[in-house]
């Protein structure tokens, strides 16, 4: 439960830090995918949301699973719509797709690490 509280605090902190005031000086002429993959604030945001979603889904409680998926979907949509309003629809779509790929990768990596860790410890007990 302590771990869950830490991830919730990280999500809240990340959403407060990544404000419009930090908006991307020097990124005006980039494609959406390049913009996301070369911007630390985007990489960190999508990775944190992906890992947090994975941790919430590992609890296997239906409310946490739904909340994790919904929060991740809303974050990706928010980034896509926000960037689409400022850089065009294609730019927003590219941003959302690249962010979703980052979040999915971090979610999957977290899940694989958990599986490997739990399988290693279950064989050690025998």
Image (cartoon, helix red, strand yellow):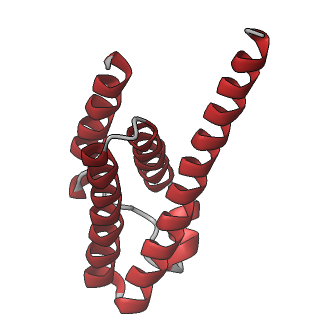
Residue 123 vs residue 22: left or right? right
Q: List the single residue furthest toward the bottom.
A: 89
User: Count of labels shown?
Assistant: 0
| Residue at image coords 66%, 41% | 112
What x and y, as percent, mark residue 103?
Answer: 50, 56
For residue 100, side relative to residue 71 (left or right): right
Q: In the image, what residue occupies the spot 28% across and 24% down? A: 5
Looking at the image, which is closer to me, 114 or 126? Answer: 126
Q: Nearer the viewer, residue 27 or 1?
A: 1
Q: Quadrant of residue 104?
A: bottom right
Q: Vertically, is 32 above or below 111?
A: below
**Residue 89 sits above or below residue 26 on the image:** below
Q: Is residue 108 above or below residue 28?
A: above
Residue drawn at point x = 41 percent, y = 46 percent: 53
| Residue 124 point in image, percent of width and height | 78, 11
Q: Residue 35 placed where, x, y %?
A: 51, 69
Q: Quadrant of the C terminus?
A: top right
Q: Of residues 98 and 40, which is closer to you in this image?
A: 98
User: Quick one: which residue is furthest to the top in this view?
Assistant: 125
């Amino acid at each position: 439960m302590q771990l869950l509280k830490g991830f919730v605090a990280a999500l809240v902190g990340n959403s407060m830090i990544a404000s419009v005031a930090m908006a991307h000086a020097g990124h005006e002429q980039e494609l959406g995918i390049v913009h996301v993959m070369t911007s630390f604030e985007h990489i960190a945001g999508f990775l944190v949301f992906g890992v947090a979603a994975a941790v919430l889904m590992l609890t296997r409680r239906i409310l946490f699973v739904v909340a994790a998926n919904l929060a991740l979907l809303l974050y990706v949509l928010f980034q896509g719509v926000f960037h689409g309003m400022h850089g065009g629809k294609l730019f927003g779509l590219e941003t959302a797709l690249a962010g979703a790929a980052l979040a999915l990768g971090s979610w999957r990596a977290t899940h694989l690490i958990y599986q490997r860790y739990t399988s290693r410890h279950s064989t050690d007990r025998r």
